Amino acid sequence: MLLPYLEKGRIECGVDEAGRGCLAGPVFAAAVILPESFSNELLNDSKQLTERQRYALRPIIEAEAVAYAVGVVFPDEIDKINILNASFLAMTRAIEALDVKPEHLLIDGNRFKSKLLIPFTTIVKGDGKMMSIAAASVLAKTYRDDYMNKIAEEYPQYDWLENKGYPTAKHRNAIAQHGITPYHRLTFKGVKEFNPNPTEISLF
């Protein structure tokens, strides 16, 4: 059962990211502040939900949240600062974009660093434990899926409609056959081997 808060009466913000393990596309993060009274039996870690369930939940979360925002870091930035730092940056951007300043952050995972001077708690598998993190996982996942579906129209051969940029066999085979696109992460294994201009990427 998901918990509504860690400490009652505090403005807590759940934060989660989507797309960290992908070969293509940005990493997205969402920050969500829910009212303490929020309740929805369907809400869960986005990975445990179907696509239909995630998209059904999104407008509910957006309508009932005290505040929410989404942050994005694109592949060129990911290649410069690495995917872990890019995930932190996407989270930071989402938090900064909130209309309401949180008093405490609930971060999915075991690490977080940011320029923000807001106390935080990291929670391993937090998207399956805290309502606000689960809500953030739904928003991050659906907003990223929307983006990947859009660029899939430009590059249909990579099967992004289905794999959303993750390293499936079909995606890897398409890279080997067709090469890489401007949306691929050039420092990632499975992509960098096919980069025709390897000296042009900034290695970390």
Image (cartoon, helix red, strand yellow):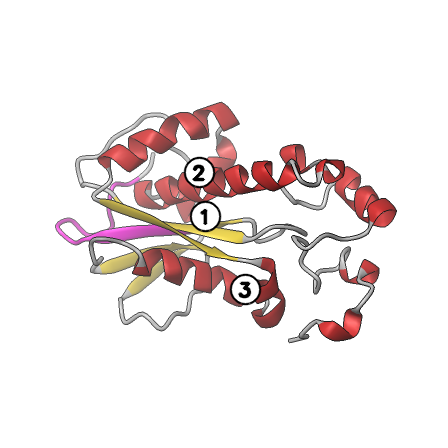
Q: Earlier in the sequence, mark 2 or mark 3?
A: 2
Q: Is residue 118 left or right of residue 133?
A: left
Q: Please give the residue where the numbered disc 3 appears in the rendered image.
A: 84
* Residue 127: % across, % down: 41, 44
Secondary structure state at the residue bearing disc 2:
loop
- Structural crowding at the residue carrying mark 1, measured as other residues with C-alpha within 10 Å and reported as few (<14), some (14–19) or many (≥20): some
Secondary structure state at the residue bearing disc 3:
helix
Q: Earlier in the sequence, mark 1 or mark 2?
A: 2
Residue 9 lies within the magenta run = yes
Q: Please give the residue where the numbered disc 1 appears in the rendered image.
A: 125
Residue 62 in the image: above or below residue 69: above
Amino acid type, callout 2: Asp
* Residue 15: % across, % down: 37, 52
Start-end of magenta stretch: 3-16
Assess whether mark 3 and mark 2 are in contact (beta carbons under 8 angstroms): no
Assess whether mark 2 and mark 1 are in contact (beta carbons under 8 angstroms): yes
Front residue of this view, candidates 17 and 126:
17
SS assignment for the magenta stretch, majority = loop
